[in-house]
Image: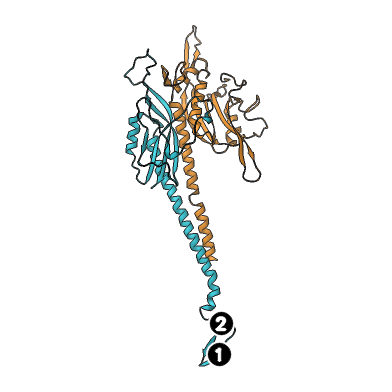
Chain colours: A orange, B cyan
Amino acid sequence: MIVSVLSVFLLISSTQYGFLVTKQLDKQYFAEYIDSSLKTIMYVTVPRGDSASISDAKEVDYLITAIKEDYADDSMLDDYRETLTSVVKGVMAPQSDVFNYVFYIHIEPDPGSAVTDEFVYMYLKWTKYALEGEGRYKTVSDAQRVEYYCNPVSMDDFTNNFLVNIGDIFQSSTTIKLPKLTQSRSAGSHFETEWPVATAYLLMWHSGEVPEPNDGLPLLEGDNSHLRCCVIGTSDCPPVSITP
Amino acid sequence: MILVINEKVVINKKGFIGPIGDDIPSLIPLIFALVLFFGVFSYSLNEFDRHNTVFDRSVESSKITAEMRSAAYIQGHDSFQKVCDSLGIKKLKYRAGLVELKIGEEKIEDVYETVNVLDIQFYKDPETGQDFRCTNVEEDASSRSGDYVVVQYPIALQTTKIWSESNPDMARTLDSKFAVRPMVLVIVLWAY
């Protein structure tokens, strides 16, 4: 009996040995991965003008510079929104089969201010699929990659109905100062520049089913949905992002 | 069985085998227990050893990736080669390098094809011909079987952009106008 107990103890120890370490190593790897991804997105240069590629462009510039320039004139990301989306898609391509991800730029309102959250840009990629089979082991079929532009009602709404329901998240963030041209209140056509501090976030999580919020409202699509997303490439998707 | 007691011969016909022979039935579970114990012990040792090998590889790969990844920005081939030369990995074999990421593709899921990680063709700058790869093995590892670890990280590569001859209006400049391209740093490690 003593030998049996010892054998069982050894067997359990050997199967569980390193489980926590392996899990921690995986977490660290994905945390570093998402951090590298965000930095890469921020660092890349994009062609200016009508060129489609860097090799042919007469002028290139940092993507972050182009974003700031685009936002400055009308507080919207319209000219370079598609370019930013291409870069995010390209950088996240190696993990897009297994992970869903979202990239967004958010401006936090000043405390006490009546201004609500502003989501300057939000691109969400979700792989939807059907599960076939009975029992514990099922197969994935009909996997479809769906891409959205979204504009959540508020950051609280986004956090409470989306982030808490998608499981373990790997995320990285960085602050960006976005220039905002406003007309001076004094006489004349003088413009002043404000510098709201925005934060760019990149999050990824393992692919899974779209969670359903507790209040019964849809999460992603629909006018009354929490994230107010539209599917890219459809006529429903507005050409520019919505600002409050 | 015949017993000699006080010089009298007693014949016992009730199955008495002897001092050791009588213990044979009780030895069977003991032997079974010992075999089970040493079998489980041996299996456990192999498992511990296997996990430790994986951890060693993970620690070594962390060292390589920390050095090569740095701030997720590589300032050209010289910077890449400098990092490559400073890696002092002796316990494991590795192949590391950059792979170009495609930007602007509509159907991103159809862009990449499946490749053998041990035979990846790393990025070569088309304008300068410089190879962005790093390895401590010379032989062809593409047909190798066995365990190996693969890690990959997106990384930004600064390259010198040389104006192409198809833009005759643009003069070649010597002030190194550059472009920053998104790449993936791929590192494959395996044991000797």
Q: Chain of mark 2?
A: B
Q: Position of residue A165 (x, y in %)?
A: 60, 36
Badge 1 local density, few (<14 within 10 Å), some, or many (20+)? few
- Out of A50 and A1, give the one closest to the viewer: A50
**Mark 2 near mark 1, Cβ–Cβ under 8 Å?**
no
- A216 relative position to A84: left or right: right
Q: Which mark is residue B192?
A: none
Task: Point out the tag, 2 or 1, that comes first from the N-terminus.
Answer: 1
Question: Which element type, helix, strand or loop, lies under badge 1?
Answer: strand
- Out of B183 and A124, give the one closest to the viewer: B183
- Out of A63 and A131, give the one closest to the viewer: A131
Q: Which amino acid does the dot numbered 2 rest on?
A: Phe
Q: Residue at x 54, y 71 (%)?
A: B28
Badge 2 local density, few (<14 within 10 Å), some, or many (20+)? few
Q: Which amino acid does the dot numbered 1 rest on?
A: Val
Task: Let me know if marks 2 and 1 both belong to one chain.
Answer: yes
As drawn, which residue projects farthest toward the right?
A216
Q: Which residue is mark 2?
A: B16
Question: Which element type, helix, strand or loop, lies under badge 2?
Answer: loop
User: How far separated are the C-alphas under marks 2 and 1?
Assistant: 12 Å
Q: Quadrant of the N terminus of chain B?
A: bottom right
Q: Chain of mark 1?
A: B
> Residue A224 appears in which quarter of the rendering?
top right
Q: Position of residue B72 (x, y in %)?
A: 41, 32
The answer to whether residue A200 is visible is no
Q: Position of residue B18 (x, y in %)?
A: 52, 81
Q: Which residue is mark 1?
A: B10
